[in-house]
Image (cartoon, rainbow, N blue to C red):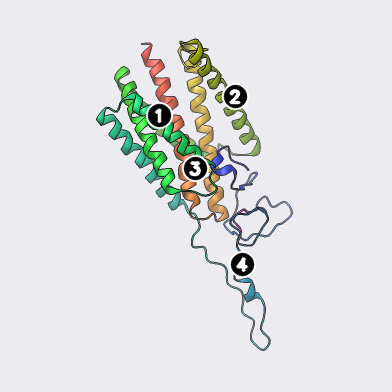
Amino acid sequence: MRSSNPVFSRRGFSRAGGYAGFDAQQQPQAGNPYASNPYAANPQAGNPYAQPNPYAAQQTQTPGQPYTAPQAPPSAGRMTMDDVVARTGMTLGLVVVTAAVAWLTGLSLGLALGAGLVAMVLGFVQAFKRKASPALILAYAAFEGLFLGALSNYVNQWVNGAAMQAVLGTMAVFTAVLVMYKTRIIRVTQRFYRFVMAAAIGFVLLMAVNLLFAAFGGGDGLGFRSGGLGILFGVIGIVLGALFLALDFKQVEDGIAYGAPKEEAWLSAFGLTLTLVWIYMEFLRLIAILQGDN
């Protein structure tokens, strides 16, 4: 199954349901949804990580010598859950640290917007790179943190406690989606993926149109980010972020099951960070609208 996240969509993940085993050398079988493992050790068309099997020669018996069973290839260098957790912790930790710096130093909104633009550019560059660049991902996290810290400080001065409420809301959504995913209340299928993608495209297009009207017509544009419509679209944005989290969890699970290279853990961390930033921003906007009207 292809991910909605461009970080993962080029990686060849193709599980259409069910859950793979951890044998990275599964052979194609009728009805096997994991026959197209993009990380298999044997060369396959379209697999950017396929390598010649150095153990194939061991399968040829030498005349006069007893047969020796071929050894399995080593599993070192594959992505694990610990790798994903560690990289995600580093990335999100850097976001938090730079956000705290921006908050405590009272970084101006002008500089914060500049940092946000830099973060957006770095994010797009990494999203369309073929391989993970830890330095690029951490640079994105640093600039994103500066933007979020200054913006949160500004909103918090207007609506006291908004930033902490947004943080708690984001943590609650993450925990709830993780529990529902692990208990299979949420099942990521092709239909689920198509629904999330269609909803996300529609949401982004509407927000872009609203931004254009606001830029050229002044005011709140079409009103999608203020008043009653603002509340509605804030809730929709949070729900979409939660659905994207489920897709991110699916891709992490697939990468581990397929024996993805260890470097893919950085891409998993990058994707999760993008989604969590989305959810936090939607919570911050929604809280500002709700409490700003009181």
Q: Nearer the viewer, residue 28 or 3?
A: 3
Q: Are marks 2 and 3 in contact (CB under 8 Å)?
A: no
Foreground: 142 or 89?
A: 142
Q: Mark 2: few, some, or many residues within 10 Å (few <14, many ≥20)?
A: few
Quadrant where the image shows the C terminus: top left
Residue range of the region highlighted in magenta in the rendering? 36-40
Single out the residue that lies furthest toward the bottom: 64
Queried whether the magenta region covers residue 52, the answer comes back as no
Q: Which residue is mark 1?
A: 169
Binning the other alpha carbons within 10 Å of mark 1 as few (below 14), some (14 to 19) or many (20 upward) gives some
In percent of the image, x 39 and y 27: which residue is there?
113
Residue 53 seen anywhere in this rendered image of the structure: yes
Mark 2 = which residue? 202
Circle number at residue 53: 4
Residue 167 image point, x, y percent? 37, 30
Classify residue 61 by image quadrant.
bottom right
